[in-house]
Image: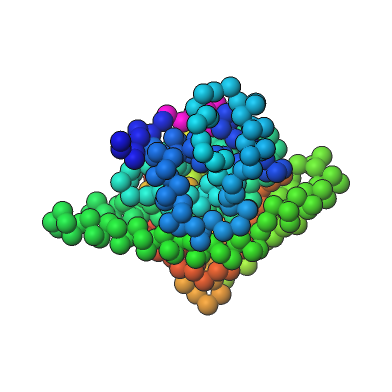
Amino acid sequence: MSDKKEISIIDQQSINDRIYEVRGVKVMLDFELAEIYGYTTSRFNEQVSNNIEKFEGEDFCFYLTQDEYKNLMSKKSTSSWGGRRKPPRAFTESGVYMLMTVLRGELATKQSRALIRTFRAMKDYIFETREIITQRDLLRISMQTAENTDAIRKMNSLVMNQGQMIKNQQKLLLEHDEKFVEAFEWINERVKQSDISPVLLTFDDVKENGEYLLREGYPAKADETYMDIYNKADDKVYIIDNYIDIKTLRLLKTVKNGVSVIVFSDNVGNQLHNYDRDDFIIEYPNIPISFIQIGGIMHDRFIILDYNKESERMYHCGASSKDAAVRLTTAIIEITSSDMKKQMHILIDQMLDNSPLVLR
């Protein structure tokens, strides 16, 4: 019997049906995750066991007790849950995200796409049920997607014999996997849901305004936050954001004279037009601005100040600047990890070679 199955078509309802609450947290079970990812349960758990150091602690995964499993079985009307010798592993949100660094190889691009679709749907579902996904998790998805895209692009560009190509593919995936996990160690210690939740209580005094976000864990006015960050640049401002419009440009009015701005974007939805850019240039002639395509390698939002300078600073943004105050869960976190910055430099240098973005 093959240890791989055909990947199931994942839709919103199928994901909702596979998310349970155990010990007060949302979890997904090993045999249902295996089905999603196209593995047999035994092969799936073998992959996890071979990388068990990545799943240490119950904040990543744990085995259900017999009582917990029986309780779930009593609520789930399906024969597929029977015949197990022991209760399944349960994976928390963090554990499910960590699976992205483990389940790789033969399924290649199809697997990566299935994973990303799954996590996007999970994110939407949890927001709807008013659970908070931390910026740690959002950043993991963004960086993993970008790294996978970059790795696959490099693989496809290799011109060599088949045996050597396979070796290089495996080496690329292994290197990107190790750097990815190491880069996020600092975030695991810095940002926890238990730290964020109490802070949200302070929004009670300002939520009627609806123009606030979380800046380093504390409420701050959304537009003022972006303008304050932009004003700190002395040389360059890089904005990475696929969803831009006229407000994206308006918030740049606090950029110091002579500081150049590059907006990396694919302008999804074509919400920013050439006349918006022209009006900005006329109103702020001392702020040079240009636009470059992202090319599909980044799926989250970042601000980089003074790139490649000693004063360089990087920020991860939970939403596009034009939508920053839509959700109280929007947050901006400064990236201080040197490993994370190295990974960002690789991606930014790649994007700097992309074609200009043509606005219509």
- Please tell me which residue lies in front, 243 or 141: 141
Q: Residue furthest bottom?
A: 310
Q: Is residue 14 magenta?
A: yes
Q: Give above or below for 317 relative to 131.
A: below
Out of 120 and 272, give the one closest to the viewer. Answer: 120
Which residues fall within the magenta stretch?
A: 9-15
Residue 243, x across and y down, in percent: 52, 43
Residue at the image position 44 percent from the left and 64 percent from the top = 179
Q: In which quarter of the image is the N terminus?
A: top left
Residue at image position (29%, 58%) is: 170
Which residue sits at x=42%, y=51%?
47
Which quadrant would the C terminus be assigned to in this image? top left
- In percent of width and height, residue 80 lies at 49, 27
Q: Residue at x 60, y 62 (%)?
A: 187
Residue 78 at x, y percent in the picture:
54, 23
Q: Splitting the image into 4 quarters, where does residue 40 fall? A: top left
Counting from the top left corner in percent of width and height, residue 94 is at 58, 50
Q: In this view, does 6 lie above or below 342?
A: above
Residue 221 visible, this orientation = no
* Residue 44 in view: yes
Q: Quadrant of residue 171?
A: bottom left
Looking at the picture, the colour scheme in use is rainbow
Query: In the image, 17: left or right of 217?
Result: left
Going by the picture, which residue comes out furthest to the left? 161
Residue furthest to the front: 85
Please check the rendered image and state whether residue 307 is part of the magenta-colored stretch, yes or no: no
Q: How many labels does the image show?
A: 0
